[in-house]
Image: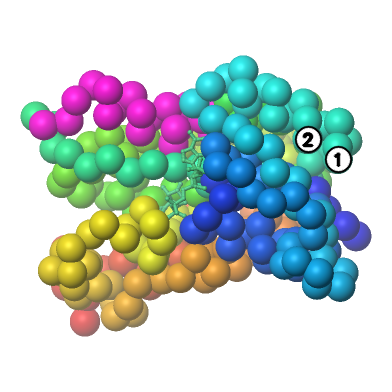
């Protein structure tokens, strides 16, 4: 059966990997991001590929989110899976981080997901799912990530509250927690810092966007899973104090 997806942050990175995966499987997917993504089948011309609908959206703007969800309702009628993947990372320790940066991170990673859920709940029938994309640093203290870690911790809380609130409607809500993944978000890290991260990962390497997308899709289809936290981190969270191997 063809499903309809709404993926925020689907213009690149992990979100784009989810979009490519589900569209290639024949599902319809609305991509909500600020930069345009081509409408049409994806990958282009692949037989059986589903429809990709680009909806220019800023998740920090409730009006933009409301308009986007209304467009999705007009085009798809209902939504089977919402993936909250839009995110920004701004580093900084507590004494250095400006209020402006804090607000940017929280309004994108946490409030944005809340607004999308708030607007999309009426489109979610029984059997549908929400998958939020968290981060290891939202579940473990990491110096220099005061805003990002706090926002992702909030997303963990949002996931659990919504899992309970929406269970009666038959809607499941789960949190997928990537470790370190090669995307634009992590591209600016110095080689030295990157090597230190890799040293701390038991698997001995960073993850790919497709490896995270595979788990997002699996969690979306896991019919008895709700309120769960699912790490996809090469063992990062399981290891003790950075002693990887
Ligand atoms: P990315 O390549 O930088 O992609 C971020 C996505 O979020 C883009 O599609 C971007 O699209 C979208 N976005 C940002 N601000 C937005 C806004 N205000 N409104 C709408 N869309 C917005 O990063 P990524 O690594 O794929 O990250 C995806 C998710 O995984 C994020 O939630 C991130 O926190 C999480 N994560 C990543 C890692 C990692 O190591 N990469 C680790 C843990 C968790 P536009 O710029 O076009 O709007």
Please, which residue is most extreme toward the left here?
Answer: 95
* Label placed on residue 76: 1
213 vs 170, nearest the viewer: 213
Image: magenta residue range: 96-114
90 vs 116, nearest the viewer: 90
Q: Is residue 99 left or right of residue 67?
A: left
From what the image shows, is residue 67 above or below residue 240?
above
Badge 2 marks a residue whose secondary structure is helix
Instruction: Look at mark 2 in the image and give the residue it sits on.
Output: 72
* Position of the N terminus by quadrant: bottom right
* Position of the C terminus by quadrant: bottom left
Q: Where residue 201 sits: x, y (%)?
A: 28, 72
What is the spatial separation of the Cα atoms under label 1 and label 2, in whole angstroms? 6 Å
- When asked about the image quadrant of residue 23, the answer is bottom right
Please, which residue is most extreme toward the top here?
Answer: 63
For image coordinates 54% across by 30% down, the residue present is 58
- When asked about the image quadrant of residue 16, the answer is bottom right
Q: Is residue 233 left or right of residue 12?
A: left
Given contact means CB atoms under 8 Å apart, are the residues at marks 1 and 2 in contact? yes
């Amino acid at each position: 059966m063809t499903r309809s997806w709404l993926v925020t942050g689907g213009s690149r990175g992990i979100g784009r990997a989810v979009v490519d995966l589900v569209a290639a499987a024949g599902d319809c997917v609305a991509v909500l991001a600020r930069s345009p993504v081509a409408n049409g089948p994806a990958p282009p011309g692949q037989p059986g590929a589903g429809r990709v609908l680009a909806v220019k959206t800023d998740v920090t703007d409730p009006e933009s989110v409301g308009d986007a969800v209304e467009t999705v309702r007009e085009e798809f009628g209902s939504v089977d899976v919402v993936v909250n993947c839009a995110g920004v990372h701004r580093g900084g320790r507590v004494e250095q981080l400006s209020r402006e940066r804090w607000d940017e991170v929280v309004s994108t990673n946490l409030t944005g997901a809340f607004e999308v859920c708030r607007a999309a709940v009426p489109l979610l029938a029984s059997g549908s799912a929400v998958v939020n994309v968290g981060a290891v640093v939202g579940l473990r203290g990491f110096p220099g990530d005061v805003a990002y870690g706090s926002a992702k911790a909030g997303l963990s809380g949002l996931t659990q509250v919504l899992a309970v609130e929406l269970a009666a409607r038959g809607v499941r809500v789960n949190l997928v927690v990537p470790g370190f993944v090669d995307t634009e978000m992590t591209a600016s890290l110095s080689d030295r810092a990157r090597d230190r991260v890799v040293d701390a990962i038991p698997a001995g390497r960073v993850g790919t966007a497709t490896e995270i997308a595979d788990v997002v899709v699996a969690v979306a289809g896991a019919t008895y899973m709700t309120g769960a936290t699912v790490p996809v981190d090469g063992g990062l969270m399981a290891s003790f104090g950075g002693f990887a191997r």
